[in-house]
Image (tube, rainbow, N blue to C red):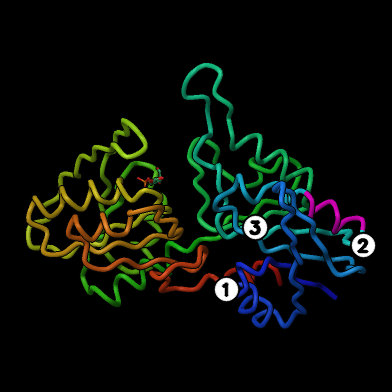
Amino acid sequence: MSLLLAFDDEALLARALAAALGWPLAFVERHAFPDGESRLRLPPVLPARAVLLRGLQRPNERLAELMLVAGGARELGAAELTLVAPYLGYMRQDIAFTPGEVVSQRQLGRALAAWFDAVITVDPHLHRVATMDEVVPGRRGVALGAAPLLGRLAAERVPGALLVGPDAESEQWVTVAAVAAGLEHAVCVKQRHGDRDVAVSLPLVDVAGRAVVLLDDVASTGRTLQAAARGLLERGAASVDVAVTHALFVGDALAELQAAGVRQVWSSDCVAHETNAVSVVPLLAQALRG
Ligand code: R5P
């Protein structure tokens, strides 16, 4: 028997995944002490195979509890422990961009490899490191793809759309989405000058009169998509919609996108958000069954 463990702030996704798998689901009970520490409680006896669902958005808040649950689960009988992190944070810092910078992807990967036997995620931001197996050395790493789901959704909602990736890294997702959906695609070039200061150069394709769907793995401040949307509309695009796997949309991100002229925003349910339009539950269930 396998058990799915989850936190109650991801109950929607957890219930859907447990139902798809036909597995029992147990929530980690949490008490927050006044000093910021957590007391966590798991079922007192765990089966040999347990899977923990925990998205690593807001990773600084979540990592300490992840470490505690992983260690606790082992002591309670989980000989084989898998992490399903639909969004895996800290993947973008994959080199030291300036001397002395901590390579967060490497450090997080090593920690996850120490705590879990396998890590399953969706559209991780892999760029200079190619595979999830490399991220979690010596363990099984699985990268599932939501981009084809988003591509097919774009084709359904905006037939004949041009799929555009806002930067070089997005090419990997835009390409598979375009193939899955039978749409044309193009990719922009991005220069980031600061957290909210982004310049995007558009591809050399004629967008005048075209319905464009911008597609990326993650929207955080939304400034990448905003800069791309502004440029596309200035060049005469008939409409710009947005599709992302991970809807972080911090602060005013969604409002800023709408202010830039973006019409509709769709996301996968990796991160619960009002824009969720496609579900990764079947992908996760298949990966866990396989
Ligand atoms: C980076 O290359 C990612 O694919 C995203 O484009 C980026 O993280 C989005 O960040 P923001 O929404 O803050 O511009």
Task: Tell me if residue 235 comes above or below residue 13 in the rendering.
Answer: above
Question: Circle 3: is it few (<14), some (14-19), or many (20+) Cα within 10 Å?
Answer: many
Judge depth for marks 1 and 2 and give the one in front.
2
Judge depth for marks 2 and 3 and give the one in front.
2
Residue to which mark 3 is pinned: 120
Q: Tell me where residue 2 appears, x and y as whole percent.
A: 81, 72
Task: Tell me if residue 198 comes above or below residue 261 in the rendering.
Answer: above
Determine the residue positioned at 47% across, 24% down. 97
Q: Is residue 230 magenta?
A: no
Q: Earlier in the sequence, mark 1 or mark 2?
A: 2
Residue to which mark 1 is pinned: 281
Residue to which mark 2 is pinned: 77
Determine the residue positioned at 28% across, 57% down. 214
Q: Earlier in the sequence, mark 2 or mark 3?
A: 2
- In the picture, which quadrant includes the N terminus? bottom right
Q: Earlier in the sequence, mark 1 or mark 3?
A: 3
Q: What stretch is highlighted in magenta?
A: 68-75
At mark 2, the secondary structure is loop
User: Is ligand 1 less than 8 Å from the beta carbon at label 3?
Assistant: no
